[in-house]
Amino acid sequence: MSGVTLYVALVAFGALAGVASGLLGVGGGTLMVPFLTLAAGLSQHAAEATSLLVILPTAVVGTLTLHRRRIGDAGLALRFGVVGAIAAVGGALLALALPAATLRIVFAAFVGCVGLKLIYDGRRSPEQPA
């Protein structure tokens, strides 16, 4: 993909990732990284780095929207965020130390485990909306 086609695909997928982020609470990485590697042709490292940057404004807007309805715990989120930001330095350095093929396998295993856990939890006990 290139030119206008790539631009249209990026805009459409950005909208889809934004909706999924607000609807499902996903940071976008589970959708964005595969899209960026498969459709946009980015390397695994570049896709993960790009996804991290894309997630920031998406997460802020989604959080503010939910916060207006008094959903979520801002204090808890900020504490997790500070620890997560510090730990992200180590994670980014580890990602850079891994070959792209290994990083892709680690990412795929993570997404697969999350998917299996969600299926297991969904079949075990349906939750009622808040």
Image (spheres, rainbow, N blue to C red):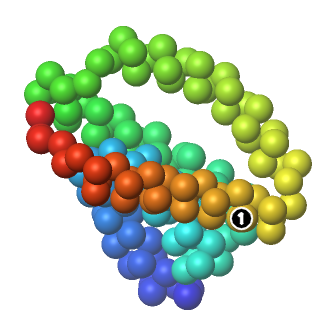
Callout 1: SS: helix
Residue 3 in the image: above or below residue 46? below
Crowd class of label 1 (few under 14; some 14 to 19; many from 20; radius 10 Å): many
Q: Quadrant of residue 58?
A: top left
What is the total number of numbered labels drawn onto the structure image? 1
Can residue 46 be seen here?
Answer: no
Q: Which residue is mark 1?
A: 104
In the drawing, does residue 63 fall left or right of residue 81? Answer: left
Q: Is residue 56 left or right of residue 53?
A: left
Which residue is at a point 67% across and 22% down the rendered structure image?
Answer: 86
Q: Residue at x 81, y 42 (%)?
A: 94
Amino acid type at image mark 1: Arg
> From the viewer's perspective, is 85 left or right of 64?
right
The residue closer to the viewer here, 100 or 105, is 105
Identity of the residue drawn at 88% across and 48% down: 97
Measured as percent of width and height from the top left, residue 77 is found at: 40, 21
Judge whether 5 appears above or below 41 on screen.
below
Question: Which residue is rendered at x = 36% and y = 35% of the image?
Answer: 60
